[in-house]
Image: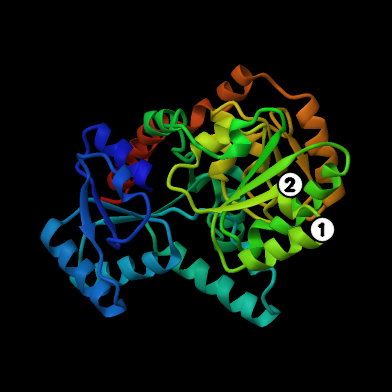
Amino acid sequence: MVNTASGLAGLGLSVDYIAPEDGPYLDHLDARVVFCGLPLGRRERFDYVCAYLRREAPDCIIVAKDKDLKLVLSARKRVASNAKIIMRPGTTILSKLDSELPLIRWYRRRAIARVYRDADALVVNAEAVRKDVSAVTGISADEIYLIRNPVINKRMLSQADGVIEHEWIKDKSVPVIIGIGNLHRVKDFPTLLEAFSIVRQQRALKLIILGEGHLKDELKSLSMTMGVGEDVDFAGFVDNPYPYIKSADLYVLSSVREGSPNALTEALALGTPVVATDCPGGVREILKNGRWGRIVPVRSPYEMARAIAATLDNHASVEELISSVNEYTQENAAKSYCKMINMVCDNNN
């Protein structure tokens, strides 16, 4: 969303970015974007958005979370605003509901469908997400916009040239695998650890995992139990992960579900070989069904281990990997968003 706002501002649109003041990546906003600090309290947020709609009278609002969509829809109704609301689901819905009890799953699916249909338009980041949202809402897939995530920009490419002092990165004698994400169950780092331990039995190898989460201690303990604790570094959250990605020998995505996984796109944009799970979402679209990286079944450590070993030995060239994600640039996404906004505003007037 930060890149989307910045890209639109770069095209000359007047853009406000409404978010809590402690939100991540706010320093990445283009200087032409006006930041509006959102209060933390639920009631305070509602009052703030109502006041904003009255004061600024925006033509269009783009939201990326279900709770934010409900908030903006309610505020628009309260003040009788003419703003068009575009909802941007970032991941598949059905896979998120799989773990729910049948009655709860039915209720939540209906609730999501109802609120999504109240938006003036829906935009997704992957064809798989478009089909999923269509199935949940009953809205034809042809009526749902598809715009790739604006992952690649000049700032990211510049940041990737930063220097990192990690001893494993500096020592090129042992290959390094990188994993990135919140240390939550959806990222399934236990499968990555098990796959790593299998490959580690055959060759020298290191694994760096960037991210924080409630499973950190559990994952550390698991790595020790597997006998690879000394070869795995849980390096925590870092503001600039791109030098790690660019310097690594391999990036592995082990998730059980995704939307359009940004780190996977970023790895390719930086010329780093990848292995990814065949999880619901946009993995196959990004990798062109395996052309640009091996795809393995979800929660299959042995398959992942074989793919890791094979990719370390043989992969596409840096130039081929970089060119494979040209459509994920901030500039291309901004042009598509601008076109969509004009269509939504024109069609609903």
State the CA–CA distance, disc 1 to disc 2. 25 Å
The residue indicated by pointer 2 is 278
Image: 287 above or below 188: above
Mark 1 or mark 2: which comes first in sequence?
Answer: 1
**Label of residue 226 in the image:** 1
User: 316 left or right of 336?
Assistant: right
Image: 218 above or below 107: above
Rendered image coloring scheme: rainbow
Label 1: few (<14), some or many (≥20) within 10 Å? Answer: few
For the image, the number of numbered tags is 2
**Which is more toward the observer, 302 or 328?**
302
Kind of element beneath mark 1: loop
Kind of element beneath mark 2: loop
Q: Position of residue 221 (x, y in %)?
A: 72, 65
Taking the spot 81% from the left edge, 37% from the top edge, the residue there is 307
Q: Position of residue 112 (x, y in %)?
A: 51, 68
Taking the spot 56% from the left edge, 75% from the top edge, the residue there is 108
Q: Amino acid at mark 1?
A: Met
